[in-house]
Image (cartoon, grey):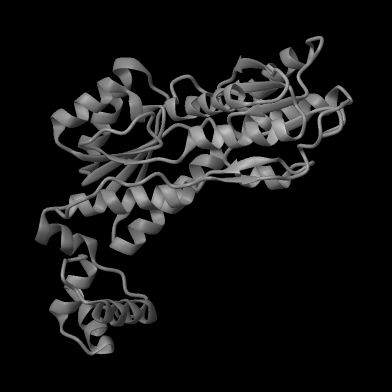
């Protein structure tokens, strides 16, 4: 079967080959009407640009990469879905690079990967987003890169993040409104600086609380189910134990639920449990997990689109924070009397 080409798209859309090329390459000053006609024809014909020909013509590889580690597979999968969606829109391929390297080995690993793959750009998730040695190496190399969920924005970098601190405060306010006065927080990977902002938000809410005195207990987790389980064992062995546990992600919250049920505690009658991210896991476990919906797919797509704009030489404005949403399910309820 003959491969659909750019001339077929032009004929179907009733425009010139040059117009189709301008739409595909996301050039400026293309009218919305022209873009819609060409995109409709592309969809009808299931046209895919010939990346090899484009690469020879432009000197680009039309590949970008995502560098990640997987303490939470649900979180990573959602980010990848968003990045891939943007790549499909712009005619790019996504290359995935998982690494658990630390220190100087991390920098060498990423630089070797970049050289091997001939990338046009690169996206990173925590903890790589705040690794100053890696960022300095990327700056020296001149590769266009973007960061998803960094601890703090940089004026010269593509950064996409969400309202972690505000979300942490909203969850704490939810628990306070239910009468909880002894709240425990399980923090995530200490190198994930954005995740630490969630604890800052909890502290903000408790400091501003006008009611009865509140106690906050913080336990270190590492963003995994097992680390949530270990933290829960310590917290639930206390006397008195906290009446609510807020974990910095859903995987750790699932570990808390497991340990609580192992001890015969009723959720939420004896213990309220909350998480963060609203991954698929949150709605599949029992009871359904109260959590913060972090728009990870949207964050991945937004970061990739900004990255590809910069690769194409278009101006890129700083991205505003993408808002979160409190999602209340059955794992939280009134504090026990």
Q: Is residue 63 above or below residue 266?
A: below
Q: Position of residue 188 (x, y in %)?
A: 54, 24
From where the camera sits, is residue 61 visible? no
- Quadrant for the C terminus, please: top right
Q: Residue furthest top?
A: 239
Residue at the (22%, 72%) spot, across then down: 23
Q: Is residue 210 above or below residue 22?
A: above
Q: Is residue 80 above or below residue 205?
A: below
Residue at the (39%, 53%) spot, across then down: 301
- Quadrant for the N terminus, please: bottom left
Residue at the (41%, 35%) spot, across then down: 68
Quarter of the image where one finds residue 86? bottom left
Q: Position of residue 8 (x, y in %)?
A: 25, 84
Which sits in the foreground, 168 or 286? Answer: 168
Q: Residue furthest front?
A: 210
Q: Is residue 220 left or right of residue 25?
A: right
Q: Position of residue 211 (x, y in %)?
A: 70, 25
């Amino acid at each position: 079967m003959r491969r659909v080409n750019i001339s077929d798209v032009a004929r179907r859309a009733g425009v010139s080959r040059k117009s189709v090329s301008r739409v595909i390459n996301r050039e400026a000053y293309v009218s919305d009407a022209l873009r819609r006609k060409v995109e409709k024809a592309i969809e009808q014909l299931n046209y895919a640009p010939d990346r090899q020909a484009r690469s020879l013509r432009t000197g680009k590889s039309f590949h970008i990469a995502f560098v990640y580690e997987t303490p939470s597979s649900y979180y990573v999968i959602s980010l990848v879905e968003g990045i891939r969606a943007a790549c499909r829109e712009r005619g790019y391929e996504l290359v995935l690079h998982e690494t658990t390297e630390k220190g100087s080995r991390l920098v060498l690993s990423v630089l070797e990967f970049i050289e091997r793959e001939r990338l046009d750009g690169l996206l990173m998730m925590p903890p790589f987003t705040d690794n100053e040695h890696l960022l300095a190496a990327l700056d020296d190399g001149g590769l266009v890169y973007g960061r998803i969920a960094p601890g703090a924005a940089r004026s010269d970098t593509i950064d996409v993040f969400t309202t972690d601190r505000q979300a942490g405060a909203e969850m704490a306010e939810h628990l306070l409104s239910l009468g909880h006065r002894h709240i425990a927080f399980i923090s995530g990977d200490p190198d994930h600086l954005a995740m630490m902002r969630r604890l800052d938000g909890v502290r903000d809410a408790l400091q501003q609380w006008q009611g009865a005195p509140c106690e906050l207990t913080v336990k270190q987790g590492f963003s995994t189910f097992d680390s949530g389980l270990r933290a829960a064992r310590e917290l639930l062995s206390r006397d008195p134990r906290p009446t609510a546990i807020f974990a910095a992600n859903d995987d750790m919250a699932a570990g808390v639920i497991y340990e609580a049920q192992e001890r015969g505690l009723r959720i939420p009658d004896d213990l309220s449990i909350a998480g963060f991210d609203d991954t698929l896991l949150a709605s599949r476990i029992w009871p359904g997990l109260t959590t913060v919906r972090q728009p990870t797919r949207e964050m991945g797509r937004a970061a990739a689109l900004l990255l590809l704009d910069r690769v194409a030489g278009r101006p890129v404005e700083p991205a505003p924070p993408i808002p979160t949403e409190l999602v209340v399910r059955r794992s939280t309820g009134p504090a026990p009397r």
